[in-house]
Amino acid sequence: MLLKYRAAIVAVATLFLCILIVFFYYSQQKDEPLPPMTVKEKKARFIALILPAVDTVYAKLQMRYEDIKTMIDNGQSHDRIEKLKEEYKVTSDEALLTALKPHPKSIAIAQAAMESSWATSRFFRKANNVFGVWSFNEDEPRIAALQKRGDKTIWVKKYSTIEEAVFDYYRTLGRGRAFSEFRQLNATTDDPLALVTKLDQYSEKGSEYGEELADIIEYNNFDRFDEH
């Protein structure tokens, strides 16, 4: 009897969360202000929106990494390898594997929380821009920030889906010159708390950025989402 009662509570709670997410989604599409939320509700909504995309992208990237590693280990040459080297701006097999290895999901989730204010920011709601990625290409989909730097307009990328934003984020860290130390360390460890110390170039906060990410990961136990 007790088990049935608990199961009923879980079912009702799950249904309520689903209804809440649908409501928030349509509010976002209509550009309406979000209703008041408790911290717990905000975080639950964030995880429900972001985690599926991170899980999907990470699984695809991990599979790609393993496929390419197998080809390289077996001494195979393939057009796919050469195209990826060009895309990730590397020349050696070792550098390619370093670029392709996806970093822990806990870091992606923590950065998404910081950069999107737990999926409540205007950039996220209007452009699915989870990671605050700027745009410097006027031909790509983008939106303008409300604030300027002097007389200069700041543009951020607009994505069709959250999954697209997550993939672009992983790609940026995989090939950006500013994140070479991050990639080198990621090739040797899966410790998110060590890795975030190498993300000081991601934000104007510098070293404080990594410290804040570490706090978010630890406080919210985001490392539970990592592959072991």
Image (tube, rainbow, N blue to C red):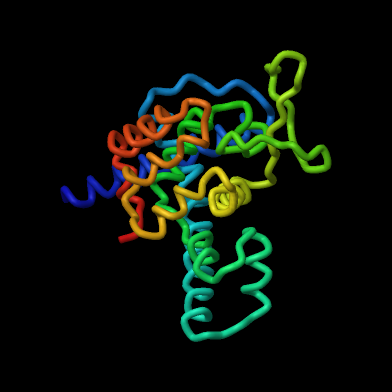
Identified at 52% across, 64% down, the residue is 95
Identified at 35% across, 51% down, the residue is 225
Identified at 51% across, 36% down, the residue is 201
Q: Quadrant of residue 42?
A: top left
Rendered location of residue 33, percent (x, y): 60, 21
Please determine whether, in this image, residue 42 is positioned above or below residue 150.
Answer: below
Please determine whether, in this image, residue 213 is positioned above or below residue 96.
Answer: above
- Left or right, residue 49 beside residue 80: left
Rendered location of residue 52, percent (x, y): 48, 51
Towards the viewer: 44 or 201: 201
The residue furthest right is: 139
- Left or right, residue 177 beside residue 106: right
The residue furthest front is: 91
- Left or right, residue 222 beside residue 79: left
Identified at 68% across, 64% down, the residue is 86
Please determine whether, in this image, residue 190 is positioned above or below residue 106.
Answer: below
Rendered location of residue 107, percent (x, y): 41, 44
